[in-house]
Image (cartoon, grey):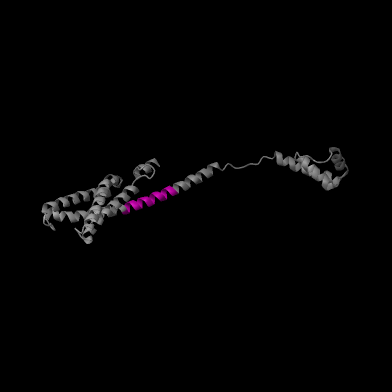
Amino acid sequence: MTCDDVRVALSARLDGEDAQAPAAALTAHTAACPGCRSWLARAERVTRLTRLRVVDVPDLTAPVLAAVAADRAVTRDGDAAARRARRQVLRVAVAVAAVAQLALALPILLAGFGVEADPHTSREMASFDAALAVGFALAAWRPERARAFLPVALVLAVCLAGTSVVDVAASTTAVVHELGHLAAVVQAGLLWALGRVSGDPERGRPLALAAVRG
């Protein structure tokens, strides 16, 4: 057996594998060969150190969990800030819509300005517009309650849009006269968006409750 053959067999035996050679032959060779004997001593020392040495592995559980929590907190804070900014913009838009609607209704109610052939009907419609304007103003003031006013705004928008389509198709009115009803559709959309952004996306609760819970 050559030295290479002996060393391969010895390495296999150190690893607990079949040496593919008689033990007596390996022993005789290492006893007579200083090079293989020195190689075997070094191999045995390396094997012993590898098997017995305790590797100190740091516990990174706490830092990893802390990093994950910090990342979630940053993401949550960023989302909350963007959500508050969108809510503020929608509050202003709803408030402007309320002021505009009230500005159109009050002259008819107080001075009969712009009243057509049927003053009673005109004032009734103005009263309804004023009430709706108050609802929009309350939604802008307390955005978490916008959803409570949303059904009224949606029904009004659907009814006005439906009757406008029917009347225009029947040629009982002109399209230009019905464009004003688009305001009701826009108002309903603003109210829906405000109610959506003012609630907790997971449970539909107000942002204030979400902040307390978080």
Residue positioned 83% across, 46% down in the render = 5
Quadrant of the rendered image containing residue 206? top left
Residue positioned 15% across, 50% down in the render = 124
Picture coordinates of residue 23, whole percent (x, y): 84, 38
Picture coordinates of residue 43, whole percent (x, y): 77, 43
Residue sitting nearer the eye, 65 or 98: 98
Picture coordinates of residue 87, whole percent (x, y): 33, 51
Q: Which residue range is magenta in the image?
A: 75-89
Seen in the picture, residue 184 relative to 58 is either above or below; the reply is: below
Residue at the front extreme? 170
Residue positioned 32% across, 52% down in the render = 88
Residue positioned 22% across, 61% down in the render = 176
Membership of 32 in magenta stretch: no
Q: Is residue 185 left or right of residue 10?
A: left
Q: Is residue 44 left or right of residue 141?
A: right
Name the dominant secondary structure of the magenta segment: helix
Residue sitting nearer the eye, 127 or 23: 127
Residue sitting nearer the eye, 66 or 90: 90
- Work out which quarter of the rendered image holds the N terminus and state it: top right
Picture coordinates of residue 58, whole percent (x, y): 60, 42
- Work out which quarter of the rendered image holds the C terminus and state it: top left
